[in-house]
Image (spheres, rainbow, N blue to C red):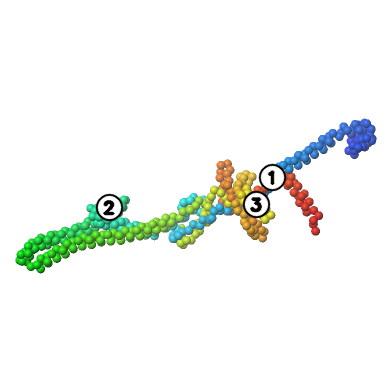
C-alpha cells in the first residue's frame, strides 16, 4: 500500500501521534517536513486553551460578588398592636368593620347605644339653661336694668324660660317698688305730722312724749325703708352667686356627658388593618374596659423579623443592606423590598426543633410592591426570605475556597 493511502502514519508505518519532536532528528528529511507541517494546529489549540484559562483567572480575581447571609422570617407590625376599648361599656348598636379590613384614622368602627347618656345630657342641659335664665334675671335686678340680657343664641332656643324669668323679673320689681312706695308715703305722712307737732310741743300744747314718739316712728320707717331695699339687694346677690356656682358645676357635668356621648362612636386612633373584632353581635353588651377591636398600624415602612444562624451572626451589623423577598409574590416577577438591619438580638433563641438562632429586625424603605402601576399590599404575617449583604468576595475566592479548606484540614484527621 502506498504512503498516500495511509495519511495517519509515517512512510515507514509509524503512527504520527506517537512521534515526539526530539525524534525528528532520527527521521529523514521527507519525514521531518511532513511532521512540521502538522504541528502549528496543535500549538494554536494549546495556546488558545492557555489564554482562556489565564483570562478566566484574571476575570475571577477582579470580579466581585456580594456575600449573603440568609434568614427566614415574617412581616410583623412596625408599631405596637392597638387594642381599642370602651371606657364606659354599653350596648352595641352598630359594627362597621370586619377582620382584615383596612381603616383610616378617625374612621367609625363601632357605635354604642347612647340613649342613656343623651337623656342625662339633655336633663343637665335644661338645668344649665334654666340657671342661665335665672342669672340673667338676677343680673338685671342687681344692676337695676330695665330688661333682661341673655347670652347670645339663648333667646331662640329657650323661649319658655325667657318668658318665665321675664315675668318673674317684672313681678319682683313691682313688689319691691310697691313696698318702697308704701313706706315712702307712710314716711311722708309721719314727717308731716312731726313737723306739725313740733311747734305745738314747743308751746306746751302737746307733750314732749308725743313728739318723741313721732320722731321714733319716723326713724323706724326710714330704717325699714332702707332695710327692705338692702335685704332685697342682698338676696339678689346671694342667689346670683349660688346660681353661678351651680351653673359652673352643671357645665362640667355637661362636658363629661358630651365626652361620654362622643366615646359611644368608637373610631380608629390610627390607620391600619383590623386584626381582630372581639364583639360582632348587635345588641351585645360591652363591659367597661373590655377589648373591642385590634388594629395593626399601617406605616410608611415594614418591619421584618428574621431568624439568622449563629454561624452568620458575626458578619451581620446594624444598618447593613438587606433584601426582603416575600414568598407570596414571586421575586423573579415582582422583585423585593430593600431595607436595612435595625436590630440584632443579644442572645439566641430555640425553635421547635431545638435549633439555636438569632433574631434580627429589618426595616424596609417601602411598605408595598409596585407592578404595572398596581400596588401589592403587604400585611403582617406574610412569610419572607431576608438576604443580608455581609461583604464582597471575588469569584476566584469562591473557586479556591474548597481547596483552601481542604488544605487546612489535610492530614489532621484522627
Q: Would residue 167 be visible to someone looking at this image?
A: no
Secondary structure under the numbered disc 1 in the rendered image: strand
> Front-most of 86 and 251?
251
| Res. 149 mark | 2
Mark 1 burial class by Cα count in 10 Å: few <14, some 14-19, many 20+: few
Q: Residue at coordinates 49% horizontally, 59% vertically from top-left?
A: 291
Q: Position of residue 118 (x, y in %)?
A: 38, 57
Name the residue: 26% across, 59% down: 236
| Viewer-nearest residue: 284 or 371 | 371
SS type, badge 2: loop
Which quadrant of the figure contains the C terminus?
bottom right
- According to the picture, the residue beneath numbered tag 3 turns out to be 316
Question: In the rendering, which numbered label is found on residue 340?
Answer: none
Residue 404 appears in view: yes
- Pinpoint residue 61: horizontal percent, then vertical percent: 73, 43
Q: CA distance from mark 3 to mark 1?
A: 17 Å
Which quadrant, please, contains the N terminus?
A: top right
In the picture provided, is 215 more to the left or to the right than 279? left
Left or right, residue 292 beside residue 72: left
Give me the C-alpha separation between circle 2 and circle 3. Answer: 77 Å
Q: Residue at x 24, y 58 (%)?
A: 168
Location of residue 59 by image quarter: top right
CA gap, disc 1 to disc 2? 86 Å
Q: Which mark is residue 65?
A: 1
Callout 3: SS: loop
Tell me which label, 2 or 3, sits earlier in the chain: 2
Kindly indicate the quadrant of the structure image that contains residue 189.
bottom left
Amino acid at each position: 500500500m502506498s504512503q498516500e493511502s495511509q495519511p495517519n502514519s509515517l512512510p515507514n508505518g509509524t503512527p504520527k501521534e506517537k512521534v515526539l519532536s526530539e525524534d525528528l532528528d532520527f527521521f529523514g528529511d521527507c519525514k521531518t517536513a511532513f511532521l512540521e507541517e502538522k504541528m502549528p494546529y496543535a500549538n494554536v489549540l494549546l495556546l488558545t486553551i492557555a489564554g482562556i484559562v489565564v483570562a478566566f483567572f484574571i476575570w475571577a480575581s477582579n470580579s466581585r460578588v456580594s456575600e449573603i447571609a440568609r434568614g427566614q422570617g415574617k412581616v410583623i407590625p412596625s408599631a405596637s398592636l392597638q387594642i381599642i376599648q370602651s371606657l364606659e361599656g354599653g350596648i352595641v348598636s352598630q359594627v362597621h368593620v370586619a377582620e382584615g379590613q383596612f381603616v383610616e384614622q378617625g374612621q367609625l368602627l363601632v357605635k354604642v347605644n347612647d340613649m342613656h347618656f343623651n337623656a342625662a345630657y339633655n336633663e343637665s342641659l335644661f338645668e344649665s339653661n334654666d340657671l342661665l335664665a335665672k342669672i340673667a334675671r338676677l343680673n338685671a335686678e342687681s344692676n337695676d336694668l330695665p330688661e333682661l340680657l341673655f347670652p347670645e343664641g339663648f333667646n331662640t332656643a329657650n323661649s319658655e324660660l325667657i318668658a318665665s324669668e321675664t315675668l318673674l323679673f317684672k313681678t319682683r320689681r313691682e313688689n319691691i317698688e310697691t313696698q318702697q312706695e308704701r313706706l315712702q308715703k307712710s314716711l311722708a305722712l309721719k314727717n308731716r305730722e312731726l313737723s306739725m307737732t313740733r311747734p305745738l310741743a314747743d308751746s306746751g300744747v302737746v307733750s314732749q312724749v308725743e313728739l318723741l314718739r313721732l320722731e321714733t316712728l319716723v326713724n323706724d320707717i326710714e330704717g325699714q325703708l332702707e332695710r327692705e331695699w338692702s335685704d332685697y339687694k342682698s338676696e339678689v346677690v346671694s342667689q346670683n352667686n349660688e346660681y353661678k356656682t351651680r351653673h359652673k358645676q352643671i357645665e362640667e357635668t355637661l362636658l363629661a356627658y358630651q365626652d361620654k356621648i362622643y366615646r359611644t362612636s368608637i373610631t380608629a386612633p390610627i390607620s391600619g388593618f383590623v386584626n381582630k373584632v372581639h364583639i360582632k353581635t348587635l345588641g351585645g353588651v360591652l363591659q367597661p374596659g373590655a377589648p373591642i377591636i385590634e388594629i395593626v398600624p399601617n406605616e410608611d415602612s415594614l418591619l421584618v423579623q428574621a431568624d439568622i444562624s449563629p454561624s452568620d451572626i458575626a458578619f451581620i451589623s446594624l444598618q447593613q443592606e438587606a433584601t426582603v423577598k416575600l414568598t407570596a409574590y414571586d421575586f423573579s416577577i415582582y422583585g423585593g423590598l430593600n431595607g436595612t438591619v435595625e436590630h440584632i438580638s443579644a442572645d439566641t433563641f430555640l425553635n421547635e426543633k431545638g435549633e439555636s438562632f438569632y433574631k434580627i429586625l429589618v426595616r424596609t424603605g417601602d411598605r408595598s410592591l409596585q407592578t404595572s402601576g398596581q400596588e401589592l399590599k403587604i400585611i403582617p404575617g406574610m412569610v419572607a426570605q431576608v438576604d443580608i449583604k455581609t461583604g464582597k468576595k471575588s469569584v476566584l475566592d469562591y473557586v479556591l475556597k474548597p481547596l483552601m479548606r481542604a488544605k487546612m484540614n489535610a492530614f489532621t484527621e484522627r
